Amino acid sequence: MGVSPGKCTVTVQIVNNPDVKAEVSVTVIDNRVAEIKLDRYEITIKKGLGDMPLVTMLPADAPDKSEIWKSSNTNVATVNFEGWIYAITPGECTVTVYSAANPDIKAEVKVIVTE
């Protein structure tokens, strides 16, 4: 298992005969989520209703595309684990989606709740 991105050579030797060995070149790539795109970065929702932005995690071959969702103000709008935003009371807040595999990567949507 790779520890960090890069290249190295792995050498295997026989203890009793160090002249017998094998080498293999290994390249470790970092294909964790590096970018999150949303189909909308601002959503207006009427109080009592809900909406959900569509999420694209990149690169497409990232093995773990699981998401963590958070609302900056749950009095205005809540968000569930799938990204469904539910409008509670008029106001504004920010809903953020994070990559579970790479929490430094995030995208934000401005949520405006109306009467």
Image (tube, rainbow, N blue to C red):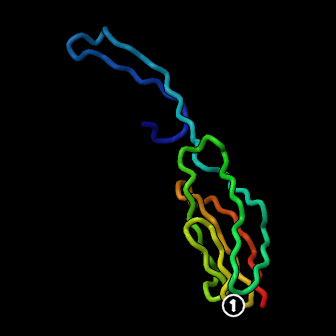
Q: Is residue 55 depicted above or below 30 in this figure? A: below
Q: How many marks?
A: 1
Q: Which residue is mark 1?
A: 89
Task: Please identify the residue farthest to the left as the structure is shown.
Answer: 16
Instruction: Residue at 77% x, 60% y: name it.
Output: 39
Q: Residues within 10 Å of mark 1 (few under 14, many from 20)?
A: some
Where is residue 60 drawn, in percent x and y?
65, 43
Q: Quadrant of residue 95?
A: bottom right
Instruction: Residue at 24% x, 10% y: name it.
Output: 17
Q: Is residue 84 left or right of residue 6?
A: right
For badge 1, the amino acid type reads Thr
Q: Secondary structure at mark 1?
A: loop
Where is residue 59 drawn, in percent x and y?
66, 44
Q: Quadrant of the C terminus?
A: bottom right
Task: Please identify the residue farthest to the front as the structure is shown.
Answer: 49
Q: Quadrant of residue 97?
A: bottom right
Q: Quadrant of the N terminus?
A: top left
Where is residue 114 drawn, in percent x and y?
78, 87
Instruction: Residue at 42% x, 24% y: name it.
Output: 10
Q: Is residue 100 depicted above or below 16 in this figure? A: below
Which residue is at the front of the view, 2 or 74? 74
Where is residue 111 drawn, in percent x and y?
74, 78
Instruction: Residue at 68% x, 85% y: name it.
Output: 48
Q: Is residue 90 depicted above or below 22 in this figure? A: below
